[in-house]
Image (spheres, rainbow, N blue to C red):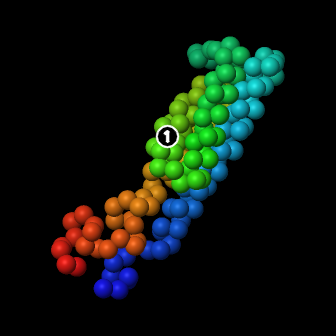
Amino acid sequence: MDSAQRDTGSPAAGTAASGSTLFAGVLMLVNGVLSVLAGITGIAKDDVYARLGDYVYKFNLTTWGWIHLVLGIVVAVTGWGVLKGMEWARGVGVGLAAVGIVAQFLWLPYTPLWALVSIALGMFVIWALCADGTGQGDSAPDRPASDRPGAAPGL
């Protein structure tokens, strides 16, 4: 059996998914570092950020600084794990991206434009980490067809 019969997906699709996962890892690493810097700023100086209007979710800026600092460190470490191909990092990355989206939503009154950009990036990270099926099920091109679920024996 030649490789054309075994491969049900196109090689370009696998490459794009792997590239998007790599990009998601880089985004997590950079966003984590930026969150650490924002956290340090919020902890050190309460007068750097100004709230726009009245908002239901009010926290002290020092509290927000600590939230961003801790979350940023964990996101950066997880992004590094995604770049290194560690299995735990993908699942943790999806969870952290979801938490990051919620945190950025709550952070909207302080940095509205950056919060919206971060929410969009978080959604991309979730998509990229969930969509790349490298080594899982039918999307593994080097896996023989007979080993795939639902394949007829001997094919």
SS at mark 1 in the image: helix
Q: Where residue 107 appears, x then y in whole percent?
A: 64, 26
Residue placed at 50% from the left, 72% from the top?
12
Q: Residue furthest left?
A: 153
Query: From the viewer's perspective, is residue 38 above or below residue 144?
Result: above
Read off the residue under disc 1: 92
Query: From the viewer's perspective, is residue 40 above or below residue 73?
Result: above
Q: Where residue 49 appears, x then y in whole percent?
A: 77, 23
Query: From the viewer's perspective, is residue 132 above or below residue 47?
Result: below
Type of amino acid at the residue the image marks with label 1: Val
In the figure, residue 61 lies in which quadrant? Answer: top right
Q: Where residue 24 appears, x then y in whole percent?
A: 58, 51
Q: Between 3 and 109, which is closer to the camera in this rendering? A: 3
Residue 111 visible in the snapshot: no
Q: Where residue 81 appears, x then y in whole percent?
A: 57, 47
Residue 146 visible in the snapshot: yes
> On the rendered image, what quadrant is the C terminus found in?
bottom left
In the figure, residue 57 lies in which quadrant? Answer: top right
Q: Between 17 and 84, which is closer to the camera in this rendering? A: 84
